[in-house]
Amino acid sequence: MPQFYGAIMFEFFTDFPDMSRRDLRDFKLAVDGAFRDFSRENGEAIESFFDPLLWFLIWLEKLLVATPWPVILIVVGGLAYLGSRSWKLALGSMLSFALIGYFGMWEDTMSTIALISVATLLCILIGMPLGIWMAKSDRVQAVITPILDVMQTIPIFVYLLPVLMLLGIGKVPGLIAVCVYAMPPMVRLTNLGIRLVDRDVLEAANAFGANDKQKLFGVQIPLALPNIFAGINQTIMMALAMVVIASMIGVRGLGIPVLQAIQNQYLALGFMNGLAIVGLAIIFDRVSQKYGKRLQEHRGGHDHG
Amino acid sequence: MKKLLISAMIVAGTAFGISGQAQAACGEFQMSDMNWPSATLMANVDKIILEEGYGCKIEMIPGATTATFATMNEKGEPHVAAELWTNAVSVELEKAMGEGRLHSAVRGPITELGEGWWVTPGTLKRHPEFKTVLDILERPDLFPDKEDPSKGAFIGCPAGWGCQLSNQQLFKAFEMEKKGWVLVDPGSQAGLDASMAKAAQRDENWLGYYWSPTAPVGKYEMQLMDFGVPFAGAENWDGCIAVGPEKCADPKPSAWTESVVQTIVTTEIKGMPDVMTYFGKRIYPGPIMNGMLVYMEENQATGPDAALEFLEKHEAIWTKWVSADVAAKVKKSL
């Protein structure tokens, strides 16, 4: 008898006391079924909610594709110069775009830029207020931080599948995928930047009788700008890293030829489009970093002045 | 404790004994466990029957068509691909078969299978006038594209798949752009499935590429459309449609080529007559396979789960593939 009990105890410790297979299956089926019913009832409404975003994205893509290439080159060079005040960087950006065009990737690149710009804009519009809110309240920070962790680590298709069932394939789910992955640094760094603002400076602002709004827009945000810019920079980088994933759910752009190359071992095609993505990333990165640095120098000047 | 140890040794001893005997009859080899449901089901059924019934020892190697075929062709491993769609690799396969490196164990291990253009059942119910693809192509307005509703959306094959080229060419051959259609690249199988599932669940119109046997086809009762034109010859298909728009500029409209699916084995397996006889008889009826695939999806069953379900539920089918003796052994193991 003791042996018998021993065996049972042993089994208890070696086999995890898990849910029965049937219960587990019923649980999974119930969740899936509930989602299917939800999608049938509300799918169209949710789809039309996102329509303005889709139209904006399509409009921007069409605009970029229809604009004559010399205009785009000049705009790219001009923006790069305005951001960085460096002729070298401006010329380098123009040259990379010229090369991208020469190797026949112009239209795909324009589609990708449209997606990345709208995604970045969306991330800033949502991420910055969230970050500010987080900086104001420790409780909010305690709630949002784990959500950001989930957003950055959850396997992408896990949340994309329900999005696809609701919205179908195409640009909007692509945008959602990009933003879920790329927004967290924006939120985190805005939060950090505002929290790092010197207490003394805030006290001084208080002493001058500044109200909350004046403190936020006149003191905290300007002083946090370098960090916020680092956040924007990170967001753009991560958005570009998601270009290929977005293409896996039917978003046109540089990701499609990359997928094609991966499936068929087309080395040249893969490298060309991969490097075009890298080129975009470097241009965006250098320009936004330089701009962020200039803001910091500006601030340094004030400190000494 | 001592008793336990001794009985454990006895069990282990008999197990070794059995596998020792078995190795003489069959052998150790690798089977490709391909990453789509019907292939993984077949591979797992083969594994159970061959291991329990014939005493083989099988290691499963995960993979997809191109990669699996490439390693089979170059390294001779894995030794068996249960469900290889050979249209995609026909040239290399013919060469390998000619040189005696690879062999076909059975042609058409599943009946009634194939690729083509499908619509949702609701589309046909609402428009009984749609008899062929040609009829549908006149009505792009019924299949509006989300990104440009003035055009009809035809959902093609994911980027990089062999069928991407064929679909591009047929899109061109049927002059679909002129008729107001746009070819949508779903980007991945997840994208293609989701696009079809969403349309079927919401009873929307949908026209796109898919293939059978698959769970979505069984589950959503997708309807395969007749192309309305005959198959325009192997020269047009293999020499133009299958190679894509960059290599051939004037594809002719054609029905989809017959899909050749085979169980491909290496020379090592060819030397095992019992195994070859088994593969030769192992043919799944299409509706049974579609039913199994729906079961797999609804129960989120893995390959091994589904193989057990198949062996338990469809005894009448698989017992015909093996001798009574082998069938008894397999049944005992379930």
Image (tube, coloured by chain):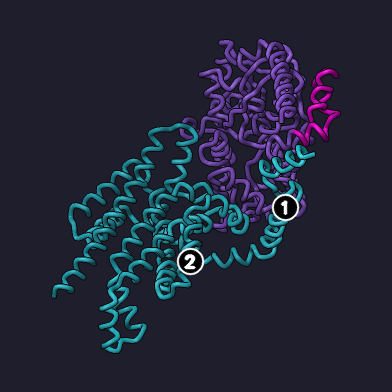
**Chain bearing mark 2:** A
Name the quadrant containing residue B42: top right
Figure chain in purple: B
B321 versus B273 height, above or below: below
Res. A235 in view:
yes
Q: Nearer the viewer, residue A138 or A294?
A: A138
Q: Chain of mark 1?
A: A
Whether pointer 2 and pointer 1 mark residues with C-beta atoms closer than 8 Å, the reply is no
Residue B258 in which image quadrant: top right
Question: Is B311 positioned to the left or the right of B171 in the image?
Answer: right
Residue designated by label 1? A29
How far is the residue under mark 2 from the one under mark 1?
Answer: 30 Å
Q: Which chain is cyan?
A: A
Q: Amino acid at mark 2?
A: Ile
> Callout 2: helix, strand or loop?
helix
For the record, the magenta segment spans B308-334
Q: Amino acid at mark 1?
A: Leu
* Mark 2 / mark 1, whichever is N-terminal: 1
Residue drawn where x is 62% and y is 19% of the image: B29
- The mark closer to the camera, 2 or 1, is 2
Residue B291 visible in the current orientation: no
- Please state if A288 lies on the left or on the right of B260 as rendered: left
Residue that mark 2 sits on: A144
- Whether residue B331 is in magenta: the answer is yes
Q: Main secondary structure of the magenta part?
A: helix
User: Residue furthest toward the left?
Assistant: A305
